[in-house]
Image (tube, rainbow, N blue to C red):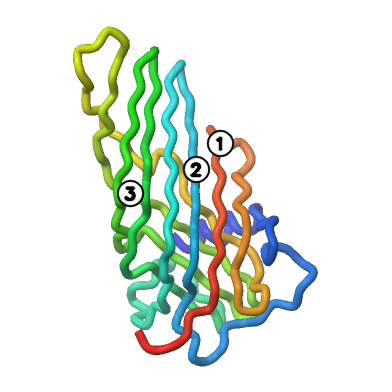
Amino acid sequence: MRRLFLVFGSVVVATACGGGGGTTPTPPVAGLRGWSGAVTYSGVVSTQGASRTMKWNGNLDWLKITDTSLIPLDAPLPPGAVSYTIKSGSLKLTGSIVAGGCSGSREIMHQVKAGESYLEVQADGSYIGNLEPTGLFDVPVSCPGGGGSVPVPFDPSELGSLRISGKLNNERMKGTMLPPPGAPGTFTGDWDLLALYGAS
């Protein structure tokens, strides 16, 4: 929901180049089709002697949403703001499980689906967004003593999401995510996106 992104953005401030102050932001300009570049994320949650880790990365295009009915609003879009989403693309995602001496890991190519991404750029050059892979897949887990592996369901949505927030630096978005206070795990991520022009 867009309001959740906005509330989160009031707390989380990007700290890398382009994520803070010191430069005059450039608002969206005519002819801009979207934003393109690299994203990375890592989430680790440990409970009762077991831990789950998710890591993913990819190069993706965030394209302008031209059909306003597709914008996930629960509050009016501010004047001059423009919304973007990933219409197609993939992430190299690795899920790992460690529990009681048993462990397993699996790498998949995750196709970004509708509703997993959102990016909003304000007229003043500030931006906020979210990227959250979803969808269960099995991780083969093996234990000491042999006997083969057992498929264990792995849910990426339980390991957080990349929360994007900052100010444009000319025609670039670059920053490092800071996890919210009290987050039940270790969550890190970053992004480096450049303005995308030209025909689709």
Tag shown at residue 186: 1
The relative height of residue 150 versus residue 195 in the rendered view (above or below) is: above
Q: To which residue does mark 3 refer?
A: 134
Q: State the residue in front, 128 or 93.
A: 93
Q: State the residue in front, 74 or 129.
A: 129
Say whether disc 1 or disc 3 marks the residue closer to the N-terminus.
3
The answer to the question of whether label 2 and label 1 lie on touching residues, with beta carbons closer than 8 A, is yes
Q: Position of residue 111 (x, y in %)?
A: 29, 57
Q: Is residue 14 left or right of residue 56?
A: right
In this rendering, the count of numbered labels is: 3
Q: State the residue in front, 91 or 153.
A: 91
Q: Position of residue 194 (x, y in %)?
A: 54, 74
Q: To which residue does mark 2 refer?
A: 42
SS for callout 3: loop
Say whether disc 2 or disc 3 marks the residue closer to the N-terminus.
2
Q: Residue at x 57, y 83 (%)?
A: 28
